[in-house]
Image (cartoon, grey):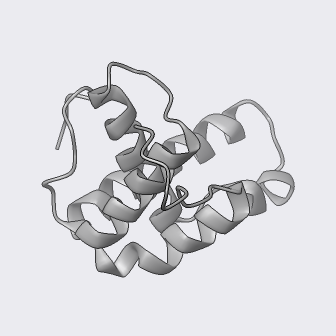
Amino acid sequence: MPQNPHLPRGRASLEVLRAEAHEELDTVIHERLLSGEDPWAFMEELPTVDEMVVYLLRADAINANDGVRPSPARDYRVLRQIALEHPALTPTVWRLIGEHGVSAPHPLRTSQ
């Protein structure tokens, strides 16, 4: 299913999002193999399918905001919204929040 990369994926089912993420990862693997890389050297550094789904949805949120990189508070809210819209991705979202040091906005501040 060809898809315009500039259209948001947010309304797609998780099954469709995972299929798209799987295709993206297959493409990355294929390209790295064609360039002569050893799969034993790079396979562990690739994201999981669910991580890729979260990254794609986050990228859509950035594109929807005219490509402006989010502040830490907005990034946290975007990731939380992904978890709310796709509950099966919640463990992945929280793991990525922890790994990337995205912190919750301060409850007394109202920035952004």
Q: Would residue 24 be visible to someone looking at this image?
A: no
Q: Quadrant of residue 15?
A: bottom left
Q: Would residue 95 be visible to someone looking at this image?
A: yes
Q: Quadrant of the N terminus?
A: top left
Looking at the image, which is closer to me, 94 or 28? 94
- For the point 22% across and 46% down, which residue is it? 9
Q: Quadrant of residue 64?
A: top left
In this rendering, is residue 59 above or below 5?
Answer: below
Q: Quadrant of the C terminus?
A: top left
Q: Quadrant of residue 2?
A: top left
Residue sticking out furthest to the left: 11
Looking at the image, which is closer to me, 110 or 32? 110
Residue 99, image x, y percentages: 71, 63
Count of number-bearing discs:
0
Left or right of residue 26, residue 37 in this image: right
Residue 39, image x, y percentages: 77, 54
- For the point 29% across and 71% down, which residue is it? 84
- For the point 69% across and 55% down, which residue is it? 100
- For the point 86% across and 54% down, which residue is it? 41
Residue 93, image x, y percentages: 50, 68
In this rendering, is residue 95 above or below 105?
Answer: below
Left or right of residue 93, residue 95 in this image: right
Residue 66, image x, y percentages: 32, 19
In this rendering, is residue 46 above or below 48?
Answer: above
Residue sticking out furthest to the front: 108
